Image: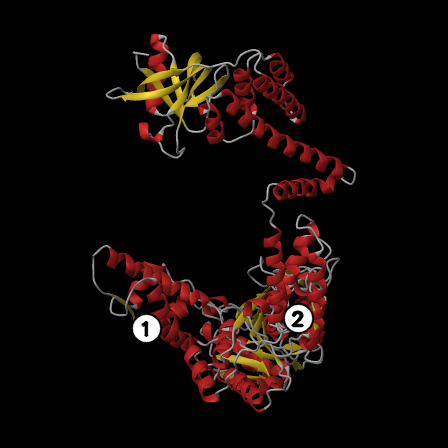
C-alpha cells in the first residue's frame, strides 16, 4: 500500500480477520485516528502494545503484525467515551512509521491468507480435528450462543476456522497475538488446537467437580463447593497452595510450644490443632478454631512482669502525682509494704470511692508506676451482660473472651495492675445474666486462681493480678461484691487543696496542651482562688481544669494575633473571660425570713447545701410537701411536724396554729430528685423558725436525722458536707454528737476554719440555730 494506514494501538484486544468486535478508545491519539478514518472513509489498523501499561506507545512498543479493520459504527456517549464496532479483514506487517501526524500511521505490507490445496490431507485432518474439539469445548461453556457451533460447522477454510476459534478462546492477548502472527497454516492450526485441548480439559474437570459436589451440596455448602472447585483447578494447573497451609500449621504448633501454657491448656490446644489439620480451610469452623488457638497462644499463661517494690520510691511517686490525700497514700504504702514482705500472700482488693475528678483512676496508674507493672483498665459502666465479664461460649461465629481475658492479653503479663472502673454502675441482672455476680469469682482471692472464661473453657490464674476498683457511690455496689473489697474513700478537696493542685498539675498540663510557656501566660494564685470559689463548685477538679483551659485559650488568642507577648491573668480579668460570677453565697438572702434553714446534703459528686423553706396559710392542718422529695425525706418531715405538735409549748408554738393553718414545706430546685436520711434536723429547725417567728442564723448549716423522742441521730458523709459548707461560705456546722469520731476525716485546714456545734437533742439545734434562742429557753423552762 502506498497510502499510509491509520493505526490505533490496543492494550488488551487482538482482532482476527473476519471477526467483528466492539472496542472503546480514550486516548487523544486514538480518538483523532478514528475520527480521521470515519471522516475520509478510510480503514484502520489495530496493533497490540507490547506493554499494556504504556500510555502513549511509539513504534518500538507495538507488535509488528496487526489487522486491517473497517469501522462499522462509531458512537460517542454523553459521558464522553468513544465506542467503535470494527470488522477485521486482513493481516498486515508494518514497514515503516509515518511521522508528523496527530495520530499514528504507517506504511504496511498486506499478508494475504494462503489456503492449502483442497486435497491436502494434513490440513484437512487438522481442520476436522479442530472443528470437533472446538464444538465440544463450546458445548461445555455455560453461556455459549448456539450460532457459534453453526459457524464452526459451516466453516470451509482452515485459516478462517483457526481465526474464528481463536477469537472465542479464553486465552491472554499475547497468546492471541502469537496466533495472529503465525502465517503458516499448519502451524496456526496446531497452536489453536493446543489451546483448545487445554481449555477442554479444564472445562471437563470443572464439570466433574460440579457433578461430585452437587450430590452433597446445600445452601450453606455453596461457598465450600466454589472453593473446592478453585482448589482442584489450581492443583491441576500446578498452583496448589497446600504448602502455605502446612506452614501455618507448623507455625501454630511452634506457637503452642512457646506459649508456656498450663498442662490442661496445652493439651486442649494440641487437640484443637489436630482438628484444624483435618479440616478444609473453606469450612466456617476452621476460622473459629484458628481464632481460638490465636487466643490460647497469645495469653500470658506464665509470664510475670518484673515487680520492684521500693517503698521510698513509691512514696515519691505518690507525692509527685497527687497532692494531699495523706490517709489514702498511707494506706497504699501499707498495701505495698505487705506485698513486699509477703509476695505469696493474698492482697486485698482496693476500691477507691469518691466523686468524679478526685483522682481515683490516676491513683491506680501511680500504683502501677511505683511497682513497675503494666497498667490495664476495664470500664464497667453500663455493662449489663454477664458475657462481657466471662466471655461468650464458642457456639457461634464472632464469639470472644470477656473483658478480663482481653485486657490480660493486652497487658502481656499475669501480674498487671488491673483497674475495674465504675464498678458501681454495673447493670442489673436480667436475661443476659448478672455481671456483678460474674465479678465475684474475679475478685475473690480464694477462687480467682482458676478463673474460667466461657470462651476459653479453661482455668486462667488471676491470683497475681493487682485488682483496683473505683466507684462514685458505695450504696449501689451489691453487698457480696462490696464484701470482697476494701473501701477507701476520696471525698473531695478543699479550696486551698484545689488551688495547690491547680498550681502543681493542672496549670502546667494546660499550658502544654495550648502550646504556651509559663513566661507567656501567668495565672496568679489569687486568680486561681477566684476560679475555684466563684466559677466552680465540685468535689473534684475537672471543672476547675476546664475553666483554666478557657483562661489559657483567651491568652493563646492574644499571643497568636501578636497583640502581646505575655499575658498575666488576675481576678480582675476573669469576668471578661469566664463571664459573671456563677456561684455566690445566697445563705444570707435565703434565711432573711423565718421558716428557712440551711441543710447539708451528700451527692454522688460531693457535698452540697440545700435550703428548707416552710410557710403557713389558712387551712385545716395539712402538710404539703414539694420539691421532688423521696419517701425518706417525706417521713422526716412528718416526724419533725409530729415532734413539734407534741412539744408545741416547749418550742413557743401556739397549738391552735395547727388547726387553723396548712403548712407547706418546699425544697428548691424541684427538678432534681432529693432523698436521704439526714434532713430531719434541717426540716425541724425550719418548722420551729416558722411557727415561732424566729429567723435562722445565716451563718449556720446543719445535718442530722431526728427521732420522735427528740434525739439527733448520726449520719454519713461528714467530710463531704463540711467541705460543702466551707465552699458556700458557712463557718458554723451543726452535726450529730455521735459523729464526733468522723471529724478526723475532715482535712485539718478545713477543721480550723469551721466551728462545730454538736447536737444530742433537737433542743440543742434550736438553741444554736435561732437568732432569738431565749424564747425557746424560756418556754422550755
Residue at image x 56%, y 61%? 668
The count of marks equals: 2
* Quadrant showing the C terminus: bottom right
Q: In this rendering, does residue 639 appear at all? A: no
Foreground mark, 2 or 1, reads 2
Task: State whether residue 319 is above or below residue 123.
Answer: below
Task: State whether residue 90 is above or below residue 633.
Answer: above
Q: Nearer the viewer, residue 47 or 120?
A: 120
29 displayed left or right of 299? left
Residue at image x 67%, y 55%? 288
Secondary structure, mark 2, is loop
Q: Quadrant of residue 550?
A: bottom left
Kindly identify which residue carries mark 1.
526
The percent coordinates of residue 535 (x first, y second) are: 41, 65
Q: Nearer the viewer, residue 561 or 697?
A: 561
Q: Nearer the viewer, residue 485 or 189?
A: 189
The numbered dot on residue 759 is none
489 displayed left or right of 85? right
Give the mark nearest the N terminus, 2 or 1.
Answer: 2
Q: Are marks 2 and 1 in contact (CB under 8 Å)?
A: no
Q: Quadrant of residue 50?
A: top left
* Quadrant showing the N terminus: top left
Q: Residues within 10 Å of mark 2 (few under 14, many from 20)?
A: some
Amino acid at each position: 500500500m502506498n497510502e499510509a494506514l491509520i493505526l490505533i494501538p490496543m492494550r488488551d484486544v487482538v482482532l482476527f480477520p473476519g471477526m467483528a468486535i466492539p472496542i472503546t478508545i480514550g486516548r487523544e491519539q486514538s480518538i483523532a485516528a478514528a475520527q480521521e478514518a470515519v471522516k475520509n472513509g478510510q480503514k484502520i489498523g489495530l496493533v497490540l502494545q507490547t506493554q499494556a501499561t504504556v500510555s502513549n506507545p511509539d513504534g518500538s512498543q507495538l507488535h509488528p503484525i496487526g489487522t486491517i479493520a473497517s469501522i462499522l459504527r462509531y458512537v460517542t456517549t454523553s459521558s464522553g467515551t468513544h465506542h467503535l464496532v470494527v470488522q477485521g479483514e486482513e493481516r498486515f506487517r508494518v514497514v515503516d512509521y509515518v511521522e508528523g501526524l496527530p495520530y499514528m500511521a504507517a506504511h504496511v505490507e498486506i499478508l494475504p491468507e494462503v489456503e492449502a490445496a483442497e486435497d491436502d490431507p494434513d490440513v484437512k485432518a487438522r481442520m476436522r480435528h479442530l472443528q470437533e474439539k472446538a464444538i465440544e469445548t463450546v458445548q461445555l461453556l455455560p453461556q455459549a450462543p448456539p450460532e457459534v457451533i453453526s459457524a464452526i460447522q459451516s466453516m470451509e477454510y482452515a485459516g478462517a476456522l483457526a481465526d474464528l476459534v481463536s477469537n472465542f478462546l479464553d486465552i491472554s492477548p499475547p497468546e492471541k497475538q502469537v496466533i495472529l502472527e503465525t502465517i503458516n497454516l499448519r502451524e496456526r492450526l496446531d497452536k489453536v488446537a493446543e489451546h483448545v485441548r487445554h481449555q477442554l480439559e479444564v472445562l471437563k474437570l470443572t464439570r466433574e467437580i460440579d457433578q461430585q459436589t452437587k450430590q452433597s451440596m446445600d445452601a450453606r455448602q455453596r461457598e465450600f463447593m466454589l472453593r473446592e472447585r478453585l482448589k482442584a483447578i489450581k492443583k491441576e494447573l500446578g498452583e496448589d497452595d497446600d504448602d502455605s497451609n502446612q506452614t501455618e500449621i507448623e507455625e501454630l504448633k511452634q506457637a503452642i510450644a512457646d506459649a508456656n501454657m498450663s498442662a490442661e491448656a496445652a493439651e486442649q490446644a494440641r487437640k484443637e490443632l489436630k482438628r484444624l489439620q483435618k479440616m478444609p480451610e473453606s469450612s466456617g469452623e476452621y476460622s473459629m478454631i484458628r481464632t481460638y488457638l490465636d487466643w490460647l497462644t497469645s495469653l500470658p499463661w506464665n509470664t510475670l512482669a518484673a515487680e520492684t517494690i521500693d517503698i521510698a520510691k513509691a512514696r515519691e511517686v505518690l507525692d509527685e502525682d497527687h497532692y494531699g490525700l495523706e490517709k489514702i497514700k498511707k494506706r497504699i504504702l501499707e498495701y505495698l509494704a505487705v506485698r513486699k514482705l509477703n509476695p505469696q500472700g493474698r492482697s486485698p482488693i482496693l476500691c477507691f470511692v469518691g466523686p468524679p475528678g478526685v483522682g481515683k483512676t490516676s491513683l491506680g496508674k501511680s500504683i502501677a508506676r511505683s511497682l513497675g507493672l503494666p497498667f490495664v483498665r476495664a470500664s464497667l459502666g453500663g455493662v449489663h451482660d454477664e458475657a462481657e465479664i466471662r466471655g461468650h461460649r464458642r457456639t457461634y461465629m464472632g464469639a470472644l473472651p470477656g473483658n478480663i481475658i482481653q485486657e490480660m492479653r493486652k497487658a502481656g503479663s499475669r501480674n498487671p495492675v488491673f483497674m475495674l472502673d465504675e464498678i458501681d454502675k454495673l447493670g442489673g441482672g436480667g436475661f443476659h445474666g448478672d455481671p456483678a455476680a460474674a465479678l465475684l469469682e474475679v475478685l475473690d482471692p480464694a477462687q480467682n486462681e482458676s478463673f474460667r472464661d466461657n470462651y476459653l473453657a479453661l482455668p486462667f490464674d488471676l491470683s497475681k493480678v493487682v485488682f483496683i476498683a473505683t466507684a462514685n457511690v458505695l450504696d449501689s455496689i451489691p453487698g457480696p461484691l462490696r464484701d470482697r473489697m476494701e473501701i477507701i474513700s476520696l471525698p473531695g478537696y478543699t479550696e486551698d487543696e484545689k488551688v495547690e493542685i491547680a498550681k502543681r498539675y493542672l496549670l502546667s498540663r494546660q499550658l502544654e496542651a495550648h502550646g504556651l510557656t509559663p513566661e507567656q501566660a501567668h495565672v496568679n494564685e489569687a486568680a486561681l482562688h477566684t476560679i475555684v470559689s466563684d466559677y466552680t463548685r465540685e468535689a473534684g477538679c475537672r471543672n476547675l481544669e476546664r475553666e483554666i483551659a478557657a483562661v489559657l485559650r483567651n491568652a493563646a488568642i492574644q499571643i497568636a494575633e501578636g497583640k502581646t507577648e505575655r499575658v498575666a491573668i488576675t481576678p480582675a480579668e476573669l469576668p471578661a473571660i469566664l463571664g459573671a460570677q456563677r456561684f455566690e453565697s445566697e445563705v444570707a438572702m435565703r434565711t432573711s425570713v423565718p421558716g428557712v434553714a440551711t441543710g447539708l446534703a451528700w451527692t454522688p459528686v460531693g457535698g452540697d447545701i440545700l435550703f428548707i423553706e416552710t410557710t403557713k396559710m389558712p387551712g385545716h392542718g395539712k402538710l404539703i410537701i414539694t420539691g421532688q422529695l423521696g419517701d425518706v425525706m417525706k417521713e422526716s418531715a412528718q416526724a419533725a411536724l409530729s415532734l413539734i405538735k407534741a412539744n408545741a409549748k416547749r418550742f413557743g408554738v401556739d397549738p391552735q396554729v395547727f388547726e387553723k393553718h396548712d403548712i407547706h414545706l418546699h425544697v428548691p430546685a424541684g427538678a432534681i430528685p432529693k432523698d436521704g436520711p439526714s434532713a430531719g434536723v434541717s426540716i425541724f429547725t425550719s418548722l420551729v423558725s416558722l411557727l415561732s417567728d424566729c429567723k435562722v442564723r445565716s451563718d449556720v448549716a446543719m445535718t442530722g436525722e431526728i427521732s420522735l423522742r427528740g434525739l439527733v441521730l448520726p449520719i454519713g458523709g461528714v467530710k463531704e458536707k463540711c467541705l460543702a459548707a466551707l465552699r458556700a461560705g458557712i463557718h458554723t456546722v451543726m452535726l450529730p454528737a455521735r459523729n464526733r469520731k468522723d471529724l478526723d476525716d475532715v482535712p485539718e485546714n478545713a477543721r480550723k476554719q469551721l466551728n462545730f456545734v454538736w447536737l444530742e437533742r433537737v433542743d440543742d439545734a434550736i438553741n444554736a440555730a435561732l437568732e432569738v434562742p431565749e424564747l425557746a429557753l424560756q418556754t422550755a423552762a
